[in-house]
Amino acid sequence: MNFPDFIEKIVLEKEYHQLTAGEKAGLAEWIKNEEEYSSIRALLLKMNVSGIGEEQLAPSVKTKEKLKAAFAEKHKEPSRLLVKRRVGIISAAASVIIVLAAVFLLVDKDPVPQPQVSEVKKETPSIPTPAPEQEPETKTETPADNTIKPSPEKEIKETSVPQPAQPEETANNSVALADQPDLAGLTVVVF
Amino acid sequence: MQFFRQSLKKYSDEELMQRAGEGNSRAFDELYGRYSARLFTYFHRMLWKNKELAEDCLHRLFLKIIEKPELFNTEKNFKTWIYSAAHNMCKNEYRRMEQHKNADDTVQSGVGSESLINIKDDYPLPGNMLDNKLFMRSLENELDSLSENHRQTFTLRYFEHLSLKEIADIMECSEGTVKSRLFYALKQLADKLKPFKNLLQL
């Protein structure tokens, strides 16, 4: 007979004289006689009634406080797992940034939009053949210290003059900022 | 806050232990709440009703959880594991006490020797409650007179309500051994409490 579950159950349920012959035979392995049966039964019944194991003592608050302090001390630095997680997140973010930067640079490699240059080119006057009479006039007007004059048309002429022999390609790339008074006279070469 | 506390109650002991190991203080609090009182009572019962010693053991046990959570295998049963640790701590205390006992025979004086008259004086309680109190005190006193293994087995079964398998795991023995120890303890106690048979009769 199974001890303790079945025997406990039967002992709690029945008095000795209520047991069947089969039950007595099964119990014989553990309980020898009526007296033993009765004393065990009384003990088990009383333990059940008394709520054995239900009454619990409470540890002091100090113990909990000490343990909480120990826990805080142990985990004041981020745990290894958290560090691993953070490193993972940071490396993933860095990878994304690198990829985005690479994509951005590739897209940015496109040449400077040509239409602007051509538009400016249209405005640039054709290279005039310098007239011998005008030369002294130009010389007198050109300041020695290279200060930029507000008259845009003349300046464009002067700056463009030294480059007549340049090939067409180079000429196309030159941008005259004639319509900007402050920058008039400057030629920007775009490579 | 109450909401979060309730949500933690859904977690198993094993999950809480894992989270506590990762630094989750609320998981640790929940575990402490679940086990501190019963383990303290267990230590108190097993260690000669010495409150200070029980308190110290409880502290050391939970400190182990804080300091070395990796000792716990999350695939195993937390309850069995923590009771095994508590059981081993009690065994260490018995060994230590044995050494002290050899040096000084008076170590155990006053422990587990309260008379029924004193209990009556200490607990002026009405009928049934006094009976129950008397019975429990007598039972615990008689329990102290049993051998270490029988006391442990009986306590784990009837006070801590653990299964035979759990007790076998904790005490590192077979279920058959647990059964025989348990029945022996039951018989011994029933026999020793015979003088209170009238009290035991319902």
Image: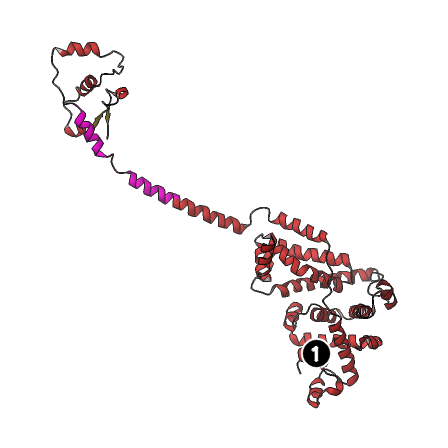
- Magenta-drawn stretch contains B48: no
Q: Secondary structure at mark 1?
A: helix
- Tell me the residue at 87%/64% (across/down): B121
- Tell me the residue at 40%/46% (across/down): A95
* Quarter where residue A43 is shown: bottom right
Callout 1: 10 Å neighbours few (<14), some, many (20+)? some
Q: Is residue A182 above or below residue B1?
A: above
Furthest residue in direction bottom, as rendered: A21
User: Which residue, given by chain and number where applicable, does mark 1 sit on?
Assistant: A8
Q: Is residue B200 above or below residue B42?
A: below
Q: Is residue A25 above or below residue A178?
A: below
Q: Which residues are magenta?
A: A97-126
Residue B111 visible: yes
Q: Determine whether, in the image, residue B118 is placed left or right of residue B189.
A: right
Q: Which amino acid type is shown beneath numbered disc 1?
A: Glu
Overall secondary structure of the magenta stretch?
helix
How many marks on residues?
1
Viewport quadrant of the C terminus of chain B: bottom right
Subunit ID for the residue under disc 1: A
